[in-house]
Image: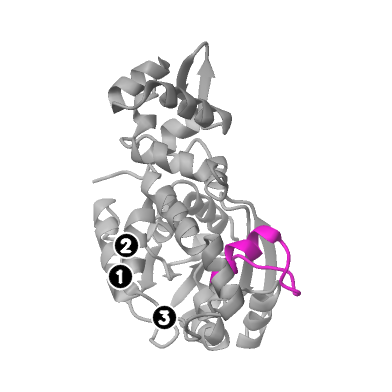
């Protein structure tokens, strides 16, 4: 049985490089060549060139670039990893995020090339009806699973455990929970709570693998379906939805009514999500993150306050909001109490 590793460092800086040219390409190339695996101790550039069978001069130039963007150190012509790179970029590390970073960069370069953006600007979306490729989501769930337990899930579990209602809670729902680590970390912070991960059937099949692998089968179960259409279960004391409601924006009032009905009296619903200003232009990072989806005809941006207002319409007696910093920059958390 695997143990969820302790996280000592942040991958915020590494992630930020993926949005930059050419830094993102340099980083992904280094990951694919497993260069960080060879920099756990200080070594000269010629040593790396011999291991990779790469061009010696260009290897030195390449390592200088990695040092320049801050993912490795250089001292007296020797190169070695930063603590963050040891943690997240060495392929044998339990917190290795290389596949996740490569996938993010691939999406940015494939979908957001200047030619593609210009085409969407001039001709509009190719199809006004957004389609969802379940196989793509399954692939993403597998490749990106580690990023959940490399800080975000621990941070959210700590936040949820700080709720005054938390000690008395018995059952939680992780709505659109993906790999399931938010549920696993949350129930592990409680003596007796059980959890349910709800997602598309092919995705919860992946979640079940991780739940077994990390020894949570006795406390975390799964439910497959489309939460905009299917029953969610009932008798929950806590419902958590992290970064998933954007895809249900057109059905948000209906979904929130279902969540309200699924909660016990006094239950708590937490939504963690990105949001933009009411005129949809700030913060700039969020508008750029959603740019490709919006240009493709997908209305998935939440203007600030929209989710809180929908919670009130669903019948929740109180709603409070806060902002939480994270590796992606930051997110808004709305807390609704029944």
Q: Is residue 100 left or right of residue 50?
A: right
Q: Quadrant of residue 318?
A: bottom right
Q: Which residue is disc 3 drawn over?
A: 131
Q: Position of residue 303 (x, y in %)?
A: 68, 74
Query: Which numbered marker is on residue 135?
Result: 1
The secondary element bearing badge 2 is classed as: helix
Q: In the image, is residue 290 part of the stretch drawn in magenta?
A: yes
User: Residue 76 placed where, x, y %?
Assistant: 52, 10
**Which one is earlier in the sequence, the residue at label 2 or at label 3?**
3
The residue under label 2 is 139
Q: Residue at x 38, y 73 (%)?
A: 198
Q: What's drawn in magenta, residue-wise? A: 267-292
Distance Cα–Cα, label 2 vs label 3 = 16 Å
The quadrant holding residue 104 is bottom left
In the image, residue 227 above or below residue 26: below
| Magenta stretch: includes residue 296 | no
Q: Is residue 254 above or below residue 46?
A: below
Measured Cα–Cα span from mark 3 to mark 1:
12 Å
Classify mark 3: helix, strand or loop.
Answer: loop
């Amino acid at each position: 049985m695997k143990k969820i590793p302790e996280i000592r460092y942040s991958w915020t800086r590494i992630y930020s490089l993926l949005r930059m040219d050419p830094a993102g390409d340099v980083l992904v190339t280094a990951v694919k060549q497993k260069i960080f695996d060879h920099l756990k101790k200080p070594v000269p550039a010629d040593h790396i060139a011999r291991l990779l069978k790469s061009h010696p001069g260009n290897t030195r130039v390449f390592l200088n670039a990695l040092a320049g963007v801050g993912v490795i150190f250089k001292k007296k012509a020797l190169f070695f990893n930063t603590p963050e790179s040891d943690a997240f970029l060495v392929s044998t590390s339990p917190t290795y995020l290389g596949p996740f970073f490569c996938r993010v960069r691939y999406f940015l370069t494939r979908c957001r090339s200047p030619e593609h953006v210009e085409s969407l600007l001039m001709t509009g979306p190719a199809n006004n009806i957004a389609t969802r490729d379940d196989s793509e989501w399954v692939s993403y769930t597998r490749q990106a699973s580690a990023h959940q337990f490399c800080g975000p899930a621990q941070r959210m579990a700590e936040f949820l455990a700080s709720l005054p209602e938390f000690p008395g809670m018995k059952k939680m729902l992780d709505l659109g929970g993906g790999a399931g680590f938010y549920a696993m970390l949350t129930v592990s912070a409680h003596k007796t709570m059980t959890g349910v991960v709800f997602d598309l059937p092919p995705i919860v099949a992946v979640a079940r693998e991780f739940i077994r692998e990390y020894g949570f089968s006795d406390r975390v179960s799964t439910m497959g379906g489309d939460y905009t259409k299917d029953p969610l279960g009932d008798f929950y004391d806590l419902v958590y939805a992290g970064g998933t409601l954007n895809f249900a924006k057109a059905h948000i009032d209906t979904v929130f009514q279902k969540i309200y009905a699924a909660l016990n009296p006094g239950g708590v619903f937490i939504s963690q999500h990105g949001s933009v200003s009411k005129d949809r232009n700030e913060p700039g990072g969020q508008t750029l993150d959603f740019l490709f989806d919006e240009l493709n005809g997908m209305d998935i941006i939440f203007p600030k306050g929209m989710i809180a207002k929908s919670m009130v319409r669903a019948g929740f007696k109180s709603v409070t909001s806060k902002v939480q910093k994270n590796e992606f920059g930051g997110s808004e958390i709305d807390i609704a109490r029944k």
